[in-house]
Image (spheres, rainbow, N blue to C red):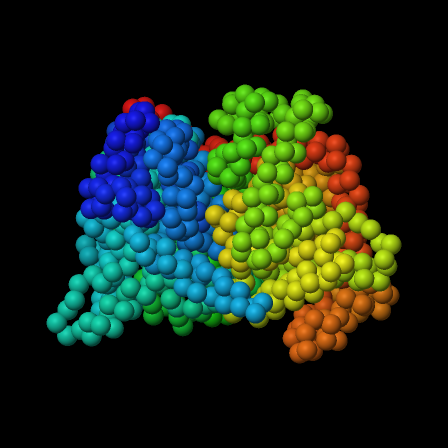
Amino acid sequence: MFSSKDSFKDSFLKRLESMCGKGFEEATKRDQYHTLGNMVREYISSKWIETNELYRSENKKQVYYLSIEFLLGRLLGQNLLNLGIKEVVEEGLNELNISLKEIEECESDPALGNGGLGRLAACFLDSLATLNLPGHGYGIRYKHGLFDQKIVDGYQVELPEQWLRHGNVWEVRKPDEAVEISFWGRIETGVDDGTLSFRHVADQKVLAVPYDMPVVGYRVDTVNTLRLWNAEPASFGPNQDVLSYKRETEAITDFLYPDDTHDEGKILRLKQQYFLVSSSLQSIIKSYKKENSNIRDLHHYVAIHINDTHPAMAVPELMRILMDQEDLSWEDAWHITTNTVSYTNHTILAEALEKWPIYLFKPLLPRIYMIIEEINERFCAELWDRYPGEWERIEHMAIIAHGLVKMAHLAIVGSNSINGVAKIHSDILKNREMKSFYEVYPTKFNNKTNGITHRRWLLKANPELTSLINDTIGEDWIKQPEKLIDLKRHVYHPELKERFAQVKRKRKEILAKKIADKNGIQVDIDSIFDVQVKRLHAYKRQLLNVLHIMYLYNRLKEDANYSIQPRTFIFGAKASPTYYYAKKIIKLIHSLAEKVNNDPRVSQTIKVVFMENYRVSLAEDIFPAADVSEQISTASKEASGTGNMKFMMNGALTVGTLDGANIEIMEEIGEGNIFTFGLTAPEVLKYEENGRYRSMEYYHHDLRIRQVIDQLTNGFFSEDEGEFEAIADSLLVQNDQYFVLRDFASYIDIQEKVGTAYQDRGKWLEQALINVAHSGYFSSDRTIQNYADGIWNIESIGVKM
Ligand code: 26W
């Protein structure tokens, strides 16, 4: 089917007819997409079956990655690339006058995640399969992924995302492997053969139906599985309110919660979490038992990883299964559970730490709550032995306290490994945030610095740069990304620099065209493309970027002789629908864009562009076109960041604080190839401790600051002077929690240096190439190998067809 372009064309045309019931002439682009998608899935299926059979027969340890989010992005292009059939398909289609790119754009971009955490999970799946590691994802098949963002008059409006509207060619529904989940009801305690038994009665049952998606490794025969669960009614009883039962059940997988910093404490979210955990664990145990007779060996064959605390109920759920269904004692079950489960922490922001009120938790999940209570009691007893009389410490560390279940504490106590996602973040966990736990479990804590898959963020997103690298150092780096460092020997070669400049220019043209089409703004290709794309959050400080642009505007207006390297400031960001401040920042960016872009003189030097509906597919057009990457979070607040790595890999220079993985990027490329500024993490933490920061002083002493802040409320932007009051208040009245004003001067200085540096074109190109050369370290292949060796203890299994 894909062995030559002629056989491809032949099969494609036949399939188009049989699938769509139309001739070639009448078929739409979407018909073509469905046809090709089906052909590819079919091509994948033999490898998929082979992989599963091999995993069964080899019976080696496997890892199951539980995540409430998988932000996959479109799959057709990536699958073609990984399978090594993209060229054949592209050429075949070309002869039929069809553009593969246009077909690819018919695929909806599955947005089953909010941002960093969900996208990391997707990169990890790609690396697991490529490294031939037996690892699978378990998640939720949300009917509606993250909302589509529309901008109306500068304001964000959310529309329901509809990725399943035209079906999903990649999924296979497996009704035979459905499992039942119990909510509500009560637990009846009895005695069986002298041991306690627990029966969950009067419960409400929900059916979890798996939809499996293939995860294709790059040029290997391994095809792993992403299993997404769909909630459906289990069965209808005679005396049941059928409609409301159906509605309530299906609501569980209706939509993805669009918030990634504020723990909302909503019961539906708790239901989603238990639904994911219980269905996944039941299915994992079932497949284990098919090949293994002794449940006591579980941890030698199975590793379960929880992506943040959202699946932390894996701990009590595994305990429940081992005790109530497999008849193990508490001690045996605990030994197996803690040796099976491992946990990654992705944030230290207090407001993101999940705490569930008992009054919600206990009635919804009575047996799970009982088990957590017992875990808590045993844990507190241990603490009591260790720290006799230290009530405060014990209360502080308890899993249940003050009417709340603390999920991070449960995850730490119940797992064998706790890791942060960048060195600084792991250190902050050990030495501050989770210090008391680190003292009790020093060996459990470790670091696994995040990574990204270069197959999506370089090979797929930037084929032009990929070819240039191949021409320069050969293709070994694709399988061994650390070999990108071979580029370093060439970065001073004028020819490479020139060709890199051409690639960048071409990618800037492509993005500029998109901007012209979508925003109606003409941007200057020779200007610096300065980009900040990420979720909108106060700690990520899009506001600092905005204030800098306002400052430039003022300078350009006031001083006719002020001349700087032209810049295009590009933003992309979704705000949580309930996050008032974040939505105001989006409006502010639009008001600023309006002002700047319509000023006949200023707009010759700077422009501001907000790209609507930032998502994986748009990101693939943005990273390759960027010159400057904005990574300007308040030091200590961004656990790692992964966008920073995607920019670097595409040859953008970072303007960044010493936060998250920025620090490791700097260590790799050297201080001379990154623009760092601002407070360091220890400085921020010290301010937070001693409370000595006074943002008002910066307002009074720095005229530049006073001017831009005054402009937020003096009608400079809008007739409604109250429009941006909340933002001004956050900086002054609320004493600027994220040190925007404190870092302002330092940011202005570094940005001036960026402008000057860009004018030394030769040097800039070298620095960009140095960034690319060192980006291999940030491949998720390295990260996943670290997890495999250091946490999961799994080995690769070579699938060979
Ligand atoms: C309870 C609501 C909620 C939902 C999601 C709170 C927190 C989250 C996530 C943990 C937020 C998240 O995506 N964190 C990001 O994870 C990335 C991958 O490790 C890191 O690179 C980012 O720095 C971190 O913000």
Name the image quarter holding residue 183. bottom left
Which residue is at 50% across, 27% downward?
Answer: 478
Say left or right for 124 vs 766: left
Q: Is residue 7 above or below residue 262?
A: above
Which residue is at 60% across, 64% downward?
Answer: 586
The residue closer to the viewer here, 17 or 369, is 17
Say left or right for 189 vs 679: left
Q: Is residue 369 above or below residue 289?
A: below
Quadrant (top left, top right, bottom left, bottom right) of the N terminus: top left
List x then y, in percent, for residue 642.
Answer: 57, 45
Which residue is at 30% across, 34% downward?
Answer: 44
The residue closer to the viewer here, 288 or 567, is 567
Say left or right for 634 vs 347: right
Q: Is residue 96 visible?
A: yes
List x then y, in percent, for residue 17.
Answer: 22, 41
- The image shows a total of numbered marks equal to 0
Q: Is residue 392 visible?
A: no
Which residue is at 36% across, 25% downward?
Answer: 798
List x then y, in percent, for residue 793.
Answer: 43, 33
Quadrant (top left, top right, bottom left, bottom right) of the C terminus: top left
The residue closer to the viewer here, 516 or 641, is 516
List x then y, in percent, for residue 549.
Answer: 73, 58
- The residue furthest front is 25
Q: Is residue 547 above or below residue 240?
A: above
The residue closer to the viewer here, 249 or 352, is 249
